[in-house]
Amino acid sequence: PYKWNRVDNLICGEEDRTMDVGMRFRRVMYGLIPEAFKSFEAEEEYVSKFQKLLSYLERMREKEDPASKLDVPIVTSKNRITDNKDDITRMTTRRDMTDSMIRFSVQLLRGKKDPFEWIEIAIDPSFDTCKSYRIMFNWLVASSAKVETQLQLLHRRCTQFGLKLISFPQTTVSWNLFLHALAVPTFICIREKGKSKGVNDVLRQLDFIYDGITISSPQFLECIDKSEDFSFPRYRSGKVKSIPSPQFVHRSGALFIRKMTDRYKKVILVGIENYRHASPENKFREIARNLCEELSEMVGKLDFDEITE
């Protein structure tokens, strides 16, 4: 059921401004995608740019709580602990990347000060130079002009710091892969057992980086021919459970790939185009289409001998 009482309290000025899933609040989402570093110096420069952005976000939060700081650990090639298990522990907890985000509210001050107009900013809890980094703006009641001002300020700061901020579509964090009726995802089905590790290698070759853990509703299986070939965990009633899976994003930002692996190591790849940031100038749609074709071709050439450990 919809949390009417909770939403009413938030709109009326309740001090606890935490937004819960299911409130149907508005959201704008951005991401930072690192370049392929050619040296340690280039990586350190990227970290320095992010630290400037983090300081800017801390100053926004300080208006609410001067004593609090954003505790975001930074992971680089010098202190990274390698793990080749696709974050299995997190995948079994049925929690996606948005559950662990650091959240804080920012009062909107443009023009007349209205205590009921505020936005919630959510950021990833850690920063890794080989992964994407997300920044979300969520709000219930706020004028479009004031929200747009905050978004423009963030873009200006990122440009000033030398960071490339890219719009990410809501579908990339949604359980519903068909959230956008006019942006249907691409499905690449790998029905042979044991190609999961090889798929990871192909994604790295095509310049995809890790984006986080996502949860997908199993309703998409109805759109796949011979979906019975795949065996995902089920409830006692026989209904397929929601599917946790790692997600990857291309360094261009044009395409996201969800990698769903069933009990027998068969894989379904879901390609999600970045329609939010697509334009004739950046040719995102053409890049995404070419990447899907190349990915399908390279995965089809994998054989069992190439990916056995």
Image (cartoon, rainbow, N blue to C red):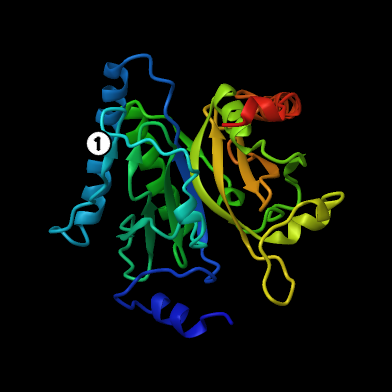
**Image quadrant of residue 269?**
top right
Residue drawn at 37 percent across, 29 percent down? 163
Q: Is residue 97 visible?
A: no
- Left or right, 295 with reference to 203: right
Residue drawn at 43 percent across, 60 percent down? 99
Front position in the image: 186 or 62: 186
Q: Residue furthest top?
A: 38
Question: Where 234 sits versus 171, above or below?
Answer: below
Residue topped by disc 1: 51
Q: How many marks?
A: 1
Front position in the image: 140 or 249: 249
Placement of the N terminus among the 4 image quadrants: bottom right
Kindly identify the amino acid type of the residue bearing the numbered disc 1. Answer: Gln
**Residue 16 x %, y %:** 31, 74
Q: Residue furthest left?
A: 67
Residue drawn at 43 percent across, 23 percent down? 35
**Residue 228 x %, y %:** 82, 56
Placement of the C terminus among the 4 image quadrants: top right
Residue drawn at 67 percent across, 72 percent down? 235
